[in-house]
Image (tube, rainbow, N blue to C red):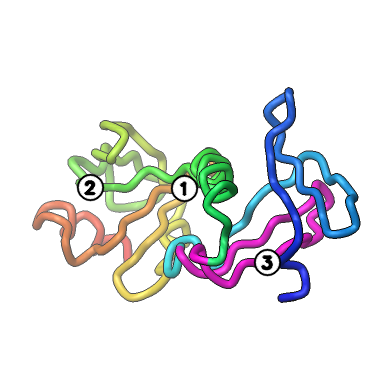
Amino acid sequence: MSGYLRPHSLERDSLGRLVFSDAHGHRHVGVYPVRAFPITAPEAGISIMNSSGKELCWFSSVKEVPVAELSLIEEELAAREFMPVIQKITHVSTYATPSIWDIETDRGPTRIRLKGEEDIRRIAGNTLIIADAHGLQFLIKDSSQLDKVSKKFLDRFR
């Protein structure tokens, strides 16, 4: 895939869509970046994909991305990778599922509904992703760093 690196350009059109122009001068409108490992290695592996999901360009590291394009990619990734980080679990309605959880996130307090224990997934080490009943995903970066009460609630479901 390294043949896809250069020359190319990435810019926004007048409608705010990302446009990738490849080495042959073909313009691909509505492209989007995708991280290979968004949680465990966010600085490694970024693809530029067309609207059909075909890879147009590959960067093995964020360091390979031209500075002018990096801000566009980071803006787009921020919008696509919205995942609040759970900082504290303050209340759980019941230890059976489904249950309602009151949590504090980096985006503020909220309430989620956990359908089943399978909605708590371990990603790597102590990193967890919790999916609520509406499909929203919440991240716990390191469950060992949670406060004692949060750990107690979480341990009842794992």
Q: Are marks 3 and 1 in contact (CB under 8 Å)?
A: no
Q: Are marks 2 and 1 in contact (CB under 8 Å)?
A: no
Magenta: predominant secondary structure element? Answer: strand
Amino acid type indicated by mark 2: Gln
Does residue 133 appear anywhere in the picture?
no
Residue 20: x and y in percent read 76, 48
Disc 2/disc 3 C-alpha distance (Å): 34 Å
Amino acid type indicated by mark 3: Trp
- Residue with the mark numbered 3: 58
Residue 8: x and y in percent read 75, 56
Horizontally, residue 25 falls left or right of residue 11, namely right
Report helix, strand or loop for mark 1: strand
Horizontally, residue 82 falls left or right of residue 142, namely right
Amino acid type indicated by mark 1: Gln
- Residue with the mark numbered 1: 137
Residue 35: x and y in percent read 57, 60
Magenta span covers which residues? 43-63
The label on residue 87 is 2
Disc 3/disc 1 C-alpha distance (Å): 26 Å
Most foreground residue, 43 or 139? 43
